[in-house]
Image: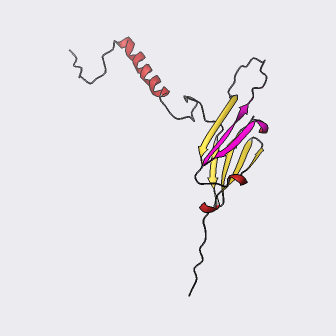
Amino acid sequence: MSIIRFMDPPFFRPGLSDFERMRREMDKLMQRKDYNTPFSVGTPVFPPLNIYEDNNNIYVKAEAAGVEADKINISVEGDNLTISGEREQQGKDMSYHRQEIETGKFSRAVTLPTKINIDAVTARFKNGILAITLPKAEEVKPKKIEVTIN
């Protein structure tokens, strides 16, 4: 007679234990949050961004391959930057064998790390890369204070 402890998983007949193990492995796979693997669950964030800064500006680079420049909208409200637009589907009347490039409308909003001068924001689009320069507001720029000798 075998002894099964209270907290042990239920006893399965030999033919069903393989199915239970496979079900548990599939559950683990579906709960993963790693979006860089081919088995990822969920949609990636589009457009992917790099945000960095120096003493005077905040720089945002967005990868927007396949998007026309006139289909991109950029807005700044307070400390939020929003990039939105649309990537149109090519060959709408064609039959696809594989479609991995997403099409349709997109929107991405990020909170900026500091206040900016909204009137001096510039953006340029070249080779599928959107580069936005956001000058920092004067009150948040570092200031050098001179020390005087009496």
| Near-viewer residue (51 or 106) | 106
In the rendered image, the quadrant that contains the N terminus is top left
Q: Report whether residue 143 is seen.
A: yes
State the image coordinates of residue 80 (x, y, percent, origin top left). Answer: 61, 45
71 drawn magenta: yes
Q: Residue 99 location in percent, x, y?
A: 69, 24
Picture residue at 66% right of the left edge, 60% below the top: 56
Our reading of the magenta stretch's main secondary structure is strand
Residue 71 in the figure: left or right of residue 32: right
Q: Which residues are magenta?
A: 70-90
User: Can residue 74 be found in the magenta stretch?
Assistant: yes
Q: Is residue 49 above or below residue 30?
A: below
In the image, residue 71 lies at what x, y percent? 76, 35
Percent coordinates x, y for residue 132 in the rendering = 70, 49
Q: Residue at x 47, y 29 (%)?
A: 31
Work out which residue is located at the far bottom of the displayed protein and give it: 150
For image coordinates 78% across by 38% down, the residue present is: 70
